[in-house]
Image (tube, helix red, strand yellow):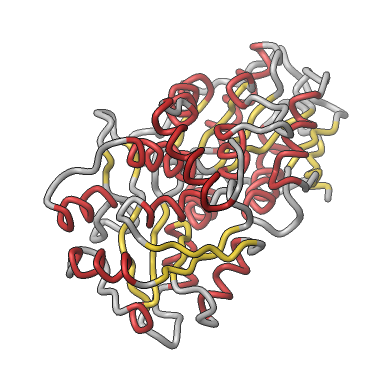
């Protein structure tokens, strides 16, 4: 799919991250005239990562020097691993190849495995977009009240009844969903082989009893849409400057898991299971990345960052992006690397807990 001559639209980022036009002058040494930019997307057409790549493509065509054509190349397979491996191996360092990263590729990298041959920490990030997520359940079938209505009662129910959720694989992005219930001692029973959209459909058919969605999709596609009582349990929130989890600004009335846990157990969560929760849900919130390959010259990286920041000045693009990633912070260039490192840096005790959990429950080796 080739994008040509798009209308003038740009993206506005979260409050406090707006960059003035004067501070975002283009790098004139780089020129993409007559060239084609390929965005490698490690998933099939129609998913969230693919949709975001296609959303950005015409804006990049407009803002990059020389107005090159921009195409999206889907490379699905292995839950995002196949396309990410391809992106890691590329020897094209002139800025004509971009890669998309997402929660699934981040979780696969963090957990490791023989098939993972890529390292996102070696990539050159252009923009990292955080996205909140909400844990919700069938209140009618489960008898849950959600939020801070009756945390102690909800925990007792979750520990006594099977909490059936959907997952693609034991090590896909939905590992965050699994751990978010296990952290409160729930009796979690996953149904594997379900994509994000299939999980939601299975939830509405009451084939699974609980699910997790990005905040935007939850508010748009789930809240008030079921024939039964859907209760939001808690949000993943996001990490503030002091390292504490903050409430999702798009669902400010909903407690974080930490607040829910404190109310239910009378103490703050801690220990290997909680460390694993922080890591994996952090990777879930660290939702979407657009990056250049390792070794891309600095002037090319700077050109892309400048283009992305210019895109950030128009409210029309902001509205479109907010539907996908919400209102959480956005990070450019090297500012994204500490956020990424924090997600990937799994404590040995947390890794040991996950290895034991996945090994005993699903016969999966980390």
Farthest residue toward the bottom?
227
251 versus 140 height, above or below: above
145 versus 306 height, above or below: below
Question: Which residue shows up at 33% across the image and 34% down it?
Answer: 16
Residue 200 percent location from the top left of the image: 55, 70
Farthest residue toward the right?
34
Question: Which residue shows up at 29% across the image and 52% down it?
Answer: 257
Residue 97 percent location from the top left of the image: 77, 29
How many callouts does the rendering have?
0
248 versus 295 height, above or below: below
Question: Which residue shows up at 50% across the image and 27% down it?
Answer: 332
User: Front-most of 358 and 42?
Assistant: 358
346 versus 41 height, above or below: above
Q: Left of 177 or right of it: where is 67?
A: right
Quadrant in the picture for residue 138: bottom left
The answer to whether any part of residue 19 appears in the image is: yes
The answer to whether any part of residue 20 appears in the image is: no
Q: Left of 275 or right of it: where is 72?
A: right
Residue 348 percent location from the top left of the image: 43, 25
User: Front-most of 45 and 207?
Assistant: 207
Farthest residue toward the front?
360
Question: Which residue shows up at 61% across the image and 21% down it?
Answer: 26
User: Front-most of 357 and 234?
Assistant: 357
Q: Left of 78 or right of it: where is 161?
A: left
Residue 264 percent location from the top left of the image: 17, 58
Q: Quadrant of the C terminus?
A: top right
Q: Left of 248 or right of it: where is 313?
A: right
């Amino acid at each position: 799919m080739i994008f040509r001559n798009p209308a003038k639209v740009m993206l506005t980022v979260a409050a406090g991250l707006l960059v003035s036009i004067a501070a975002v002058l283009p790098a004139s040494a780089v020129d993409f005239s007559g060239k084609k930019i390929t965005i490698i997307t490690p998933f099939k057409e129609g998913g969230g990562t693919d949709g975001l790549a296609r959303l950005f493509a015409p804006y990049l065509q407009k803002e990059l020097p020389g107005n090159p054509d921009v195409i999206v190349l889907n490379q699905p397979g292995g839950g995002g691993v196949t396309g990410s491996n391809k992106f890691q191996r590329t020897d094209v360092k002139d800025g004509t190849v971009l890669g998309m990263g997402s929660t699934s590729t981040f979780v696969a990298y963090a957990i490791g495995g023989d098939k993972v041959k890529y390292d996102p920490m070696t990539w050159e990030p252009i923009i990292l977009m955080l996205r909140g997520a909400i844990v919700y359940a069938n209140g009618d079938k489960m008898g849950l009240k959600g939020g801070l209505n009756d945390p102690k009662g909800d925990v007792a129910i979750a520990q006594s009844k099977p909490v059936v959720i959907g997952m693609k694989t034991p090590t896909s992005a939905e590992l965050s969903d699994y751990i978010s219930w296990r952290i409160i001692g729930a009796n979690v029973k996953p149904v594997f082989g379900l994509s994000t959209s299939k999980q939601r459909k299975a939830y509405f058919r009451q084939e699974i009893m609980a699910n997790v969605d990005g905040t935007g999709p939850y508010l748009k596609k789930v809240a008030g849409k079921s024939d039964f009582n859907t209760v939001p349990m808690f949000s993943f929130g996001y990490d503030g400057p002091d390292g504490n989890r903050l409430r999702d600004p798009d669902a400010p009335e909903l407690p974080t898991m930490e607040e829910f846990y404190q109310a239910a157990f009378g103490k703050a969560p801690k220990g290997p299971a909680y460390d694993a929760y922080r890591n994996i849900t952090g990777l879930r919130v660290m939702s979407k990345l657009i990056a250049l390959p390792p070794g891309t010259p600095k002037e090319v990286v700077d050109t892309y960052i400048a283009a992305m920041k210019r895109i950030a000045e128009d409210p029309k693009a902001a509205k479109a992006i907010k539907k996908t990633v919400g209102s959480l912070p956005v990070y450019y260039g090297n500012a994204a690397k500490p956020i990424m490192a924090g997600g990937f840096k799994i404590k040995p005790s947390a890794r040991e807990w996950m290895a034991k959990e996945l090994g005993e429950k699903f016969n999966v080796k980390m």
